[in-house]
Image (cartoon, coloured by chain):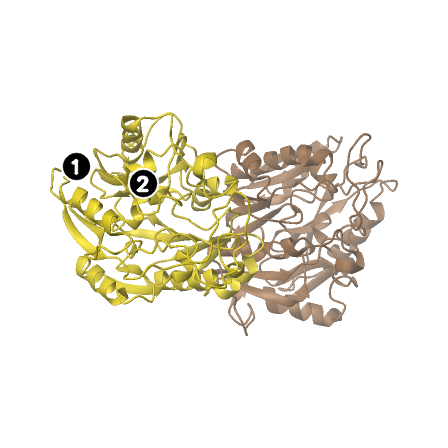
Chain colours: A brown, B yellow
Amino acid sequence: MAKRIIGTTPKQDGFRMPGEYEPHKQIWMLWPERPDVWRDGGKPAQKAFVEVAKAISEFEPVTMCVSANQYAHARNVLPPEIRVVEMSNNDAWMRDPGPTFIKNDKTGEVRAVDWKFNAWGGLFDGAYFPWDKDDQIAQKVCEIEGIDTYRAEDFVLEGGSIHVDGEGTLITTEMCLLSPGRNPHLDKEGIEQHLKDYLNLEKIIWIKDGIDPDETTGHVDDVACFVRPGEVACIWTDNPDNYFYQYCQDAYKTLSEATDAKGRKLKVHKLDMPKECVRIGKGFTIDYIEGSIPRPEGDICIASYLNFLIVNGGVIVPQYGDVNDALALKQVQEMFPERKVVGVDTREVVYGGGNIHCITQQQVK
Amino acid sequence: MAKRIIGTTPKQDGFRMPGEYEPHKQIWMLWPERPDVWRDGGKPAQKAFVEVAKAISEFEPVTMCVSANQYAHARNVLPPEIRVVEMSNNDAWMRDPGPTFIKNDKTGEVRAVDWKFNAWGGLFDGAYFPWDKDDQIAQKVCEIEGIDTYRAEDFVLEGGSIHVDGEGTLITTEMCLLSPGRNPHLDKEGIEQHLKDYLNLEKIIWIKDGIDPDETTGHVDDVACFVRPGEVACIWTDNPDNYFYQYCQDAYKTLSEATDAKGRKLKVHKLDMPKECVRIGKGFTIDYIEGSIPRPEGDICIASYLNFLIVNGGVIVPQYGDVNDALALKQVQEMFPERKVVGVDTREVVYGGGNIHCITQQQVK
């Protein structure tokens, strides 16, 4: 029902990765529970995940994958229209170990790439150890759906480190993809070749840095994404005192000067950062476990509005209780006049190290 | 995607349980691994399960549910056309904790009954403790498929303890359904009423005893089943020295005298038992765990050819290396001239306490 494709690449077989704005069959999520990542036993984060899942399910189906121990609880607190399936895991970031769905436009067939996953850097600078359950997630998702996979055994990649336009262009960061924790056996050219072979691309646009060197080593999905072919959104601030000011300037400059696979100069939409940094709060109880990244009180969280998710007919946007929340919704709405923009308070997700885009993965229709 | 139906019964909503010979969408199975049930770490049984799954998949799709620990191994040894999904469990008998699929003939909708499961007798005389994971299996299967369920919270039942003709008749055993380990709060009439309400029946035919008082407390699926409406198969032996002689005589007599919901007198097909008893062999390593039924060397196993599974266009029949193996295939073929009959050596399954029917559950199309 779900084969491993051996001996050919997606490009050879006529498969490409569609843009996130192309139609989805459903969104996949994973249930948060580990107490060294999620404060207070994961209970506040679980409530936020429920709200994200509900918001998405107004637009398209959602499947929540949940460990055996949390299955009954998750099933009880999620509405019946959200499918709940058992899946063991090391954490809850479906974007990263999850499958990258690809499509053959001639036959309509959907397959997936099952990248090698090493918890954002493996033994070099990964976020936790072990990550064996996470690395099985892509295959398990595809088995449930009966979708054939390409296993990229020699190539480490997370879904959050790339964005594509569906027309041959990918944006990523050097900070992440050239990190020694990912594919030190490959040079930049070798990495480009893998991306091109697996996702059917002609052009890679390299942004130098992401904004979270310590967690994902700078995933692009906190920095920039395609809004439609030829247009991108990029984080922004006019305030030189903003913690992320220089990152914003640099990414904006790179994208403004870039051309895509079709030779188009990109239109770049600015999306302001929150005014205030979100920080790990006082009184949070977060377990300390050797090998996991500590989260002490006052630590700056990587709160970017850009970590939104495009769904069928909508966009689900993080909200942080910041004065810029409404501005973010307005700016995203202007980028997507044809979609309904919905904000969800996801501070509890950002305390764990990511946001709406990080905890979701779209399955192409 | 998969609701709990509250406040109505399947009968009220126009759902009935189809006969096993009606069309299936697929067959569900569970992967064996517990070393206090399956000899030698479950490895011989796993090979037998693979052979059963392969035989079925020649006729219709198969989904194998596997614990996290065994997932990679099961995926590797099963052919790609068999779907493998993660599901924690207490053991491998999908027939019993699995969902009973029911259908509304007017709308075509399929739902399921999620019976309460207590490991064949709970704390009274159950086969093991705990059984919490098994009791979640019906719901988990239905979630994956997006099928709504009726949870029978106040009614313990296993799929192997019943057979229906799809036209209002059910056969079962008093030994099982009236056992104090099942529903001691209900009398025979109360149990009949539950069966009628959940499966849309008019007539219950009671056989006195099953042939395994110690394991399932006498499931009917080792004794008799419907071949088509108005016709049943029943275990048989002419040899008074056969260990199961009296059980065969009694069941045959009961069925020969019975009429079904439509008032038809049943045609009863004889299916001979194996000539020799299958026994727990010398040198088997089976862990001993307090609370599980011990399986000492020489113990008689419940080897009945009747524990076959009807699939789309076929019948999968147990084989035991017995002189009667060929006779069983011939007798089953005569009952089902329109189906292809396939034998599979399942001695390793019967060592664990059941057979092909016990380890499978059909999902109605």
Q: A346 above or below B233?
A: above
Q: Chain of mark 2?
A: B
The local secondary structure at tag 1 comes to loop
- Tell me the quarter of the picture where residue B203 sits: top left
Q: How many marks?
A: 2
Residues flagged by tags 2 and 1 on a common chain: yes
Q: A102 above or below B67?
A: below
In the displayed structure image, the side of residue A125 where residue B155 appears, left or right = left
The local secondary structure at tag 2 comes to strand
Please name the amino acid that badge 1 sits on.
Ala
Tell me where residue A267 appears, x and y as whole percent: 68, 52
- Tell me the number on the disc at residue B261: 1
In the displayed structure image, the side of residue B32 where residue B6 appears, left or right = left
Q: A209 above or below A357?
A: below
In the displayed structure image, the side of residue B341 where residue B114 appears, left or right = right
Whether residue B117 is visible:
no
Whether residue B264 is visible:
yes
Please name the amino acid that badge 2 sits on.
Ile
Report the residue at 72% width, 53% height from top.
A220
- Tell me the quarter of the picture where residue B346 sits: bottom left
- Tell me the number on the disc at residue B102: 2
